[in-house]
Image (cartoon, coloured by chain):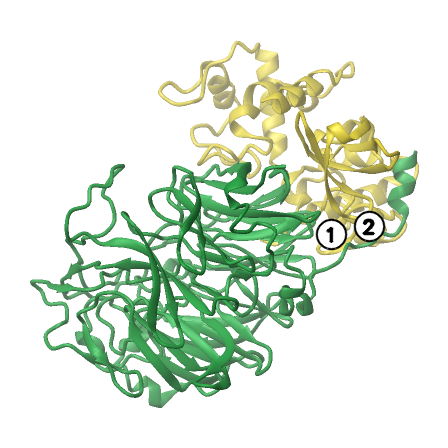
Chain colours: A yellow, B green
């Protein structure tokens, strides 16, 4: 529970820009009100999948908004006290979770995107796709089934805003002075687990560490200046095409 | 920033698990690299730090609590300090083997079409290179990256709608992953198949129910009965590199308790099969229970032993069977060398010179029912036995004196539905609730030490309730095993004396294993819905 609490807090602190699109404003609401039961991808309740646009008892935005307000009596779906604006933003966010390649902004060319990903983007230096590339960053083989176009574009332009708590890096120094850096996989009061730069799974006792620094920024460079708008769209289209092995 | 610089340095992979390492697990006993700890199926470890003198100082180091309440049948792998294990049905975890803390998990959600006779279970993984392999309850085989937990490929071995599933840990041989299918209660046509470890492409398939490609053996099935003949192969086989042969056990013919429509021996059900590892071609077979009407799957771990037989060195195959007989074969030729009962049975009056059972008269299921020893769960089952090259004893998790009234009925095959042709009842083994209340003629469980060279019982460790626990032996002559009562025991492997026990509170339906990190030996067993790891007090 500590973990989930930290996650929600981090997202609440993510300040909303003035005049934000309703989808952006709906994200934090989703994390607070929906995430605990529906999960990050909206697939944790049987028969409901926000990711694939599957709802059990609603089809229109108005019906969704009504259910968000009143809940579904006799089920685990509780009522909320969200305002009409908040509900509109939340519905927009729910709709945005259902996104396919066709709805990517400026639908790009996935094949060109792959060439950029493997070539000038140097993405495989940190990421892995279908068994190729480094395991230091998150494996992206199924990212197209998990993320929508808007999220991916944000991750490419502003990686610091998009890095998930589950993908943060950590730098530790042992009492004998050895420094180890890697992507944090898990931690608790007494231990911390990470994958280090040699792709080894490492588990450490905190009592044997002199220093533990959780790096809040993403080690990934922003691509706003490095890629043209078309190249960016191509890469997003490529990422959306990655649906995993099944 | 510094991390970014580090990331751009070409990644160095830590030592990969080559096939050569799998063949020489005796050289690195700190690891546990296959389901049975080696390709020979002995479940014997060369570790000896924990010994009969200090075993009383074992203490609990950590517990992994499964989220699933399904039976916990896994044997973990340990590779250089990282433990890979599965909780039911198909949830894979990488843990720090020293602390039990989680590195990653991969939760495969099986299709709702999956149908399993006896629990949505999984018994573990295989590894090659940096890839893990898992069979699934919906009939698939999945390759998973051992560093990240991400699936690499995922293929269908058998159609789950027809009852095909995979519950056992695969066996890696060279560049292939070998699995068999479960589904003997659903009228499947059983098979063992090998898949390319890199791509998942099927390399060969051996049908355990002989069909048109094997006309002579097909004649052992009346009419079209072979089409739904069962003979599943739901447990890991063994491998002999000297002859490049895979040894595997096959399950019961279907329908289980009514053989009327499948007159004949029903090859290759209830058999040991020796297959060429490159082609899947049958080298030899031995059928333990021809025309089985009792559900006596020959789904046990084939145990390969090189030892003197009647004064001459011989490559042996030892096999404690569900049908209550213990067998020894020459594994190069398949020649039957000996067979002796190790539990009460009444379906056969003995074995003939070739090892074929001589059936007792009138001992078949009838519509009214016939009392048969042992019961359908057998005198042993899939629970791993162990062979210690030090004591030269073969250790069997056994059910003694079990019986059951087996009744047959007519049943038509309907795709995807249970196809058992009978209704066993009135078993005298296994508790019926939270309490164990045995009576005078109840079955009981025992850890049985057999001298495989004489077929004689050396010692027996009796338990009140029956056992589904595998057995582990070590180079310090310790034996680890549990039972349904929730006790985990360390016995003296030489004489069966109890040296230590822990009350874990849940029945053990898995095999114990052992490993070491920084010279410290650990012992792990699943009990109830948790995985327990012990080591000596500091």
Q: Quadrant of residue B366?
A: bottom left
Q: Position of residue B93 (x, y in %)?
A: 58, 45
Disc 2 target residue: A124
Nearer the observer, B476 or A225: B476
Chain letter of the residue carrying label 1: A
The image quadrant where one finds the N terminus of chain B is top right
Q: Where residue B476 appears, x then y in whole percent?
A: 55, 57
Q: CA distance from mark 2 to mark 1?
A: 8 Å
Q: Position of residue B482 (x, y in %)?
A: 40, 49
Image position, residue B295 (x, y; %)? 26, 66
Q: Would residue B181 appear left or right of B278 to someone viewing this image?
A: left
Q: Nearer the viewer, residue A41 or A113?
A: A41
Which residue reaches farthest front?
A: B53
Q: Are marks 2 and 1 in contact (CB under 8 Å)?
A: yes
Relative to B464, say whether B475 is above or below: below
Task: Say above or below: B243 vs B391.
Answer: below
Position of residue A240 relative to residue A169, above or below, is: below
- Kindly state the secondary structure of the residue where label 1 is placed: strand
- Residue occupying image coordinates x 51% and y 51%: B52
Number of numbered discs on residues: 2
Q: Is residue B91 visible?
A: no
Residue hosting label 1:
A129
Seen as rendered, the residue at the extreme left is B368
Q: Secondary structure at mark 2?
A: helix
Which chain hosts label 2? Answer: A
The quadrant the C terminus of chain B occupies is: top right
Q: Pick the residue in front: A221 or B90.
A: B90
């Amino acid at each position: 529970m500590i973990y989930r609490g930290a996650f929600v807090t981090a997202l609440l602190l993510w300040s909303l820009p003035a005049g934000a699109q309703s989808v952006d404003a709906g994200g934090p609401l989703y994390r607070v009100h929906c995430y605990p039961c529906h999960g990050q991808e909206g697939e944790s309740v049987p028969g409901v999948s926000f990711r694939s646009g599957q709802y059990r008892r609603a089809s229109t935005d108005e019906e969704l908004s009504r259910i968000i307000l009143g809940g579904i009596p006799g089920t685990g779906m509780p009522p909320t006290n969200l305002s009409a604006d908040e509900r509109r933003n939340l519905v927009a966010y729910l709709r945005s979770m259902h996104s396919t390649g066709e709805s990517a902004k400026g639908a790009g060319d996935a094949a060109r995107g792959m060439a950029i990903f493997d070539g000038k983007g140097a993405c495989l230096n940190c990421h892995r796709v279908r068994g190729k590339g480094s395991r230091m960053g998150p494996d992206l083989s199924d990212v197209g089934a998990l993320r929508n176009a808007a999220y991916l574009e944000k991750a490419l332009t502003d990686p610091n805003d998009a890095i998930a708590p589950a993908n943060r890096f950590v730098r530790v120094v042992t009492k004998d002075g050895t420094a180890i850096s890697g992507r944090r996989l898990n931690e608790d009061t007494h231990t911390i687990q990470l994958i280090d730069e040699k792709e080894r799974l490492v588990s450490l006792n905190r009592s044997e560490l002199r220093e533990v620094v959780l790096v809040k920024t993403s080690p990934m460079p922003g691509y706003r200046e490095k890629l043209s708008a078309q190249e960016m769209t191509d890469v997003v289209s490529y990422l959306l095409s990655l649906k995993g092995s099944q | 920033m510094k991390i970014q610089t580090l990331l751009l340095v070409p990644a160095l992979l830590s030592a990969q698990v080559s096939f050569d390492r799998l063949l020489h697990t005796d050289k690195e006993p700190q690891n546990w690299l296959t389901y049975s700890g080696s390709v020979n199926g002995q479940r014997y470890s060369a570790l000896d730090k924990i010994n009969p003198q200090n075993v009383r100082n074992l203490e609990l180091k950590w517990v992994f609590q499964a989220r699933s309440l399904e039976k916990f049948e896994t044997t973990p792998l340990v590779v250089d300090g990282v433990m890979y294990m599965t909780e039911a049905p198909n949830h894979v975890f990488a843990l720090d083997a020293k602390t039990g803390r989680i590195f990653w998990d991969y939760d495969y959600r099986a299709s709702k079409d999956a149908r399993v006779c006896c629990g949505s279970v999984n018994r573990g993984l295989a590894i090659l290179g940096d890839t893990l392999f898992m069979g699934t309850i919906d009939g698939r085989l999945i390759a998973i990256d051992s560093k990240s937990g991400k699936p690499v490929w995922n293929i269908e071995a058998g159609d789950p709608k027809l009852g095909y599933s995979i519950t056992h840990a695969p066996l890696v041989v060279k560049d292939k992953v070998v699995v068999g299918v479960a589904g003997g209660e659903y009228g499947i046509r059983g098979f063992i198949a090998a898949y390319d470890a890199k791509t998942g492409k099927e390399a060969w398939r051996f049908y355990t129910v002989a069909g048109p490609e094997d006309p002579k053996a097909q004649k052992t099935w009346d009419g079209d009965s072979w089409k739904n003949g069962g003979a599943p192969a739901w447990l890991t086989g063994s491998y002999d590199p000297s002859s490049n042969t895979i040894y595997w056990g096959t399950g019961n013919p279907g329908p289980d308790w009514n053989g009327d429509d499948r007159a004949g021996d029903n090859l290759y059900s209830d058999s040991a099969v020796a297959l060429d590892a490159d082609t899947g071609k049958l080298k030899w077979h031995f059928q333990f229970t021809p025309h089985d009407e009792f559900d006596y799957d020959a789904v046990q771990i084939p145990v390969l032993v090189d030892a003197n037989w009647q004064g001459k060195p011989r490559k042996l195959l030892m096999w404690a069977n569900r049908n209550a007989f213990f067998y020894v074969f020459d594994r190069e030729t398949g020649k039957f060398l000996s067979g002796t009962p190790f539990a009460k049975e009444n379906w056969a009056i003995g074995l003939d010179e070739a090892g074929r059972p001589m059936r007792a008269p009138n001992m078949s299921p009838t519509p009214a029912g016939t009392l048969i020893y042992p019961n359908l769960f057998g005198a042993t089952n899939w629970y791993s036995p162990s062979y210690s090259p030090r004591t030269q004893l073969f250790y069997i998790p056994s059910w003694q004196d079990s019986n059951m009234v087996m009744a047959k009925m007519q049943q038509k095959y309907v795709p995807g539905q249970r196809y058992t042709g009978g209704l066993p009842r009135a078993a005298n083994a296994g508790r019926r609730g939270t309490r164990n209340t045995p009576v005078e003629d109840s079955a009981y469980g025992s850890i049985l030490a057999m001298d495989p060279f004489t077929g004689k019982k050396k010692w027996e460790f009796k338990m009140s309730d029956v056992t589904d626990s595998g057995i582990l032996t070590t180079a310090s002559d310790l034996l680890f095993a549990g039972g349904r009562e929730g006790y985990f025991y360390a016995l003296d492997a030489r004489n069966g004396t109890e040296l230590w026990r822990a009350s874990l509170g849940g029945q053990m339906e898995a095999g114990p294993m052992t490993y070491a990190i920084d010279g410290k030996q650990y012992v792990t067993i699943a009990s109830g819905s948790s995985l327990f790891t012990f080591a000596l007090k500091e």
